[in-house]
Image (cartoon, rainbow, N blue to C red):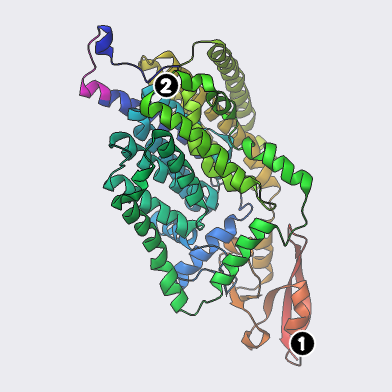
Amino acid sequence: MSEPAPNPSALGASAPSWRERFLRRAVLALLLAAAWGAIYLPALGIPEWKGEEARRAMPGLQMLQDGEWLVPKIGGRAYHRKPPLINWIAAGAVHVTGRADEWAIRLPSALGVLALTLAAFFALLRPLGEMRAVAAAVFILTNIGLMEQGRKFEIEALYVTFTGLALLAWLRGWWGGREGDAGWLAWLIAGLFLGLGLLLKGPLHLLFFYGAVVPVLLAAGQLRALLRPAHFVGLLLALGLFASWAVPMLRTGQTGVSGVWLEQFTDRVTGATHAFDFLRWLRNLTFQAWVNFVPWVILAALAARPAIGAGLSGSTQALWRGLRWAIALPYLCVMILPAASPRYVLPLLVPGAILAAFVLPDQGALTLVWRRLVRGLEIILILAFVAGLAWMLPGENAAALAPELKTGVWVGSLLAGALLLLCFEVLRRAQRFEAGTDLVLRSAAVMGLVALIYGTVVPPRLASAERLRPLARALEAAVPRTDYLYAFDPDSQPAFFYLRRKPRYVLTPEALPETARYVFVGESDLPRLTAGARWQVVRECHRYIDRGGLTFLLVELARR
């Protein structure tokens, strides 16, 4: 193992001019952006909401409607389980794009991955050199965990982005500073992203940030750098950003939020509300969380070997030594908890990608196997993608595969992704990159092809098994245009996102107006709605069972 590539002038060659360096780095950034576009954009808006996506997006739409920005609401009730930044992002995406659809709201997650990838490349150029900087950026861009989360509107992709940007800002400042002093600018940028992380999910990301900063400083013998004023000012900035929302929100009388967060924390630590499953816990601890870093987890494991560190010196070795602990300690602290989930440790993707980059340059058996594997996958994946498009492009095939699919948008996005990969290959071949950089870039192209095949096969299958859009159509067909749809204490109902006319929420029977006729209500809540002498059910218009097994009814009511 060796330090980053030596200066060409030391080898008798002329050093590249600043214009040549600028052009080279601009081309690399364009290659990374092209790979990102091929992976994250095709068919981004085709699948309907999955998991918790609607719960994150719909409060933002409600904020746009009623102008209440402090307290997120779901189904008419205040929602205290998460801070509001994810809802603000949804509202901002709709406002900026002018579109209230899945594509517009998922786009910030994908853009966050792009920002993190490019930031990793530029921040690591000086500490690691060009080859390793490109490798770390590609490893961040193309791991399975982030490829999944970056195509959804969930908290995790943006959480990884903010935590990673804070760490990269500090690392860039630390490398250029003296005696561990990252400098004011680095700490302020880190504090900004740490504050955004607090507004997104709470303080857990501080464990991953300081879990990397402290080991690196310890390895360098510079732990006293944490006592510098710039560090405390950056931390105060992070806490101040959170307080700018929390203090006004508490003044509105929402005093239950602290109790909800304490209950969540206690549940995560003790697993009190869930029956402890030892086998599931052991599987998560030893295996499941590492799946998120496939396929690069093997390189991270190889880079942690003592033989890798033996060839390093100075700050580079301190960084390598610190990153090993930056992964191991936070991982154990989180995953040893009874109720821990693999997604909780997704912020470790960034230090893991940096550590994995230390494997390069390597001219032994590893590189040989890696190169041959990439060549074989390129041929197989290209043939699979072309064959899939040849079969699916005819209109009758696409329509038969998924009647509800927006075929033109779907096929167009796949072709755009293929065009981006083609441009990627043209740019890559036009530059004479060293062997390690070229291998990493070709690996990114392979992952782009995997994503395009995923976009060819999976979204149509999901579209043919949709549940939310059909429910929205059934509700709209059952409620006359002259009437309103009322939702009685419905909690989160993702299908409401697809209604052209949004429902009116009521939380008590007394709040239901005298003119109401059509009400969407949980079967278990129907007796509460019809108790007393005010309302009676005329007929049941539609019955729906959600994925959790709960039954909801659309009923027509009349005054008794």
The answer to which quarter of the image holds residue 517 is bottom right
* Front residue of this view, candidates 303 and 228: 228
| Highlighted range, magenta | 13-21
Determine if residue 147 is in view. Answer: no
Disc 2 residue type?
Leu
Q: Does the magenta stretch include residue 18?
A: yes
Q: How many marks?
A: 2
For discs 2 and 1, the disc positioned in front in the rendered view: 2
Give the x, y percent position of residue 444: 50, 26
Give the x, y percent position of residue 440: 47, 22
Q: In which quarter of the image is the C terminus?
A: bottom right
Whether residues under marks 2 and 1 lie with C-beta atoms below 8 angstroms apart, the answer is no
| Residue holding disc 1 | 531
162 on left or right of 367: left
Q: Residue at x 34, y 50 (%)?
A: 227
Can you say whether 129 is above or below 120 in the image?
Answer: above
Q: Which mark is residue 312?
A: 2
Q: Does the magenta stretch include residue 86?
A: no
Give the secondary structure at mark 2.
loop
Q: Which residue is drawn at 55% across and 48% down?
A: 152
